[in-house]
Every structure is written in C-alpha cells, then in structure tokens.
C-alpha cells in the first residue's frame, strides 16, 4: 500500500520496493501470469491503433517541439527510402521513459544520474509492454450525467431512461449493456461542479471521481492494469484548423489527474502499471492547487515549468510509466457500444538506448 512507503528512502518512493538495481519501475507489475490472463480478454479480435500520426498536433501546444520533416529519396526508379529530421519523440502520441523527469529534492528514479542512459526507453522496448488495458471514459461519464461534452452537431447524445447516454451502434460486436446496471448516476465529483464538462478547461480529476467513473462503468481493477483516461482533448485539438490551434494555444488548458497525494495513493494502491491519456500531460493543466510544491522549486531557464506537477513524484519516485496524447476516441466508442471497458493492450516503444520518450505504438485488442 502507498502508506507503507512512508519509511522508504526517499519517502513514498518505490526504489527499495523494486530493488536498488531496478530500471523498469511499475512495468515490473506486468508479471507473465497477468499478461497471460489479459490475453484472454481478446474476444472479437478487433484491433484499434492508439497512436496519432506524426505532426498531428502541429503546432505543438507548448511550442517546444518543432514539426518533424519527412524526406523520401530514390536510388533508382524501383527504389524508395526515407529519413526524418527534427523528430521530437514526444511531439505526438508518446510514452515517457523514467529518464524524462527528475525530482527537485531526490533526483531521478532510483538515484540515477540525469546524464545516465540507464533509465532510457529501451528498458521497456527490450520486452515490449502488454497487459490488461482499462479505459475510464471521463468525457462519456459527464455526457451521461447530462453535463457534456457537446457533440459535433451541437447537441448532446440522447439520454436513456437510466440516465446514461443511448449506447452507440455495436458494429457487429456484442449487444450493448446498460451503464452500470442501469442505475441512476450520482452527482459527479469535479472542480467544475455545476457547469458543463469542457475539455478545453482545467477539469481536475480527483481520486473520488476516478472511483465514481469506474463504478458507473462496472470496472474493477486486477493489479498491473494499464489505465487509459479518455477526456476528448486530443480529438478536439486535431479537429481544429491551423488558425484555431494557434488561437487555442494562447489559452491552452486540459483536464487531468489532480496534483494530490491522494492521486499517488490511488494509482499505487490499484497497482497501476501505466497511466496514459489523450491530453498533453495526463495531469490537470495548468497546475492549480498542488501537494508537490517545495522550497527547491524554481522557474526554469526555458521550457515548461514543472513546479507542482504530478510528473515529479509519479515518475521519479514511484517509477510509473506515463503516456500522453493517445488516440482514444474510437476505443471509447467501442467500449460504450459493448459495455466492456477492459481489453488486451500492447505498447512497443522504439528501441532507442537512453531514449527519453517514444511513440507508444499502442494497440487495443477487443
């Protein structure tokens, strides 16, 4: 349990839990037995890719990752080859390695030097990542409660008698199941209580809200799960025109996990091996109230200010794998159509020794 880590060194870290020589963090929770059990979730064999295309998020919201340049050449008329320039490995759907973020007081995961390649993405690429994926559909939950998000046509999906949205077409899959057994929805927990859900705002996802969404979907956690959070942010961004993206980036906000110790406790106690979302940060952005600000914080010379961010304790102390900007809308629709929110999930980052990040190359198998 998370509270058992209070006496760890550093406090509330997994460094001694996984061992002094560990370089893989919470991916260690994906035991062979858990992976084998997860593979049994494949029923229809339908495959859903969870990566957006390279340059899908241009201009990149933080302005720190220029577009990738793709070049094709030929040595003769029956030959083609290609290469990339300016390929920022976290400029589209991405997976953060444990080398990505350090803690201002305790440094990088398991005491590694920031200049060491020991925590690179190759540690996960060597084996790949596979296990039970679980989707929590944040946007769908608020829609079921009658609080958005608005559809592309400008109206909400019609509500069923049970208070949830009418199920989407099953597309040849199993018959849709009533949401959470057809019970009435409880009032959602949210920093945005009383207003419609809007993925262009900072909606803070507290631990209590995660439990409420899971209960509504009928989801339980088995340990070693790969948690995906669908907010609708990425699909909303890529649907914008270039001019609309430029305007939005002047006021960029996104829903995400609360910067609270209770979030760390929830993730650790549920034995989450990886957490990913369709937002730029997984956590609420910008940071508001946070349990993680400290005297060692200082504004950076350049780039994003990580002060108060969940990234620091989650990656550097707990060693948890994090993914951002995953393509989750189609997966959310399929889960809503079938009433099943778990599936077999694979992730195969690029094998770049010492890499700080990589496209996840993620696939959900239904």
Image: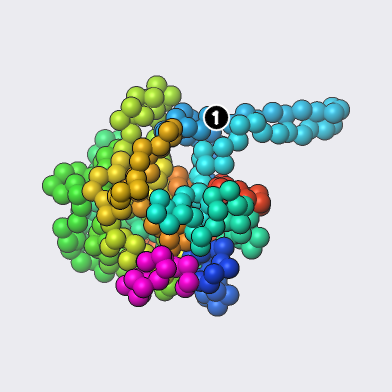
Q: Residue at image x 43%, y 61%? A: 317
* In magenta stretch: residue 5: yes
- Residue 273 vertical placement versus 300 (above, below): below
In x, y percent, where is residue 192? 19, 46
- Residue 218 vertical placement versus 294 (above, below): below
Could you say which is closer to the camera, residue 214 or residue 19?
Answer: 19
The answer to whether residue 163 is left or right of residue 74 is: left
* In magenta stretch: residue 260: no
Quadrant of the rendered structure where residue 228 is? bottom left
- Residue 199 vertical placement versus 174 (above, below): above
The answer to whether residue 354 is left or right of residue 342 is: right
In x, y percent, where is residue 315? 45, 56
In x, y percent, where is residue 71? 69, 28
Q: Residue at image x 82%, y 33%? A: 79
Q: Which residues are magenta?
A: 1-17
In x, y percent, where is residue 325? 45, 44
For the question of whether residue 288 can be seen, the reply is: yes
Q: Residue at image x 55%, y 63%? A: 24
Which residue is label 1 attached to? 67
Q: Quadrant of the N terminus?
A: bottom left
Where disc 1 sits, the SS reads: loop
The answer to whether residue 199 is left or right of residue 94 is: left
């Amino acid at each position: 349990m998370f509270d058992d880590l209070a006496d760890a060194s550093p406090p509330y870290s997994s460094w001694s839990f996984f061992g002094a020589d560990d370089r893989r963090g919470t991916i260690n929770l994906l035991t062979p037995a858990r992976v084998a059990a997860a593979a049994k979730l494949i029923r229809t064999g339908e495959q859903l890719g969870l990566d957006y295309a390279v340059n899908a998020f241009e201009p990149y919201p933080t302005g720190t990752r220029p577009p990738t340049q793709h070049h094709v050449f030929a040595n003769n008329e029956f030959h083609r080859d290609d290469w990339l320039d300016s390929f920022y490995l976290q400029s589209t759907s991405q997976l953060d390695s444990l080398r990505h973020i350090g803690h201002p007081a305790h440094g990088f995961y398991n005491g590694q030097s920031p200049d060491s390649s020991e925590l690179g993405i190759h540690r996960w690429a060597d084996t790949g990542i596979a296990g039970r994926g679980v989707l929590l559909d944040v946007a769908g939950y608020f829609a079921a409660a009658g609080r958005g998000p608005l559809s592309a046509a400008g109206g909400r999906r019609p509500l069923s008698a049970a208070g949830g949205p009418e199920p989407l077409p099953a597309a040849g899959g199993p018959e849709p199941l009533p949401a959470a057994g057809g019970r009435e929805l409880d009032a959602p927990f949210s920093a945005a209580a009383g207003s419609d859900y809007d993925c262009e705002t900072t909606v803070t996802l507290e631990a209590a809200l995660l439990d409420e969404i899971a209960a509504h979907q009928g989801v339980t956690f088995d340990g070693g799960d790969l948690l995906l959070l669908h907010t609708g942010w990425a699909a909303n961004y890529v649907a914008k025109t270039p001019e609309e993206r430029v305007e939005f980036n002047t006021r960029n906000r996104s829903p995400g996990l609360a910067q609270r110790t209770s979030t760390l406790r929830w993730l650790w106690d549920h034995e989450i091996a990886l957490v990913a979302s369709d937002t730029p940060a997984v956590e609420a952005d910008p940071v508001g109230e946070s349990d993680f600000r400290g005297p060692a914080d200082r504004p950076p010379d350049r780039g994003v200010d990580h002060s108060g961010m969940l990234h620091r304790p989650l990656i550097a102390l707990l060693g948890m794998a994090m993914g951002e900007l995953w393509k989750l809308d189609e997966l959310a629709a399929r889960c809503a159509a079938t009433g099943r929110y778990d599936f077999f999930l694979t992730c195969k980052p690029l094998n770049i020794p010492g890499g700080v990040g990589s496209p996840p190359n993620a696939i959900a198998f239904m």
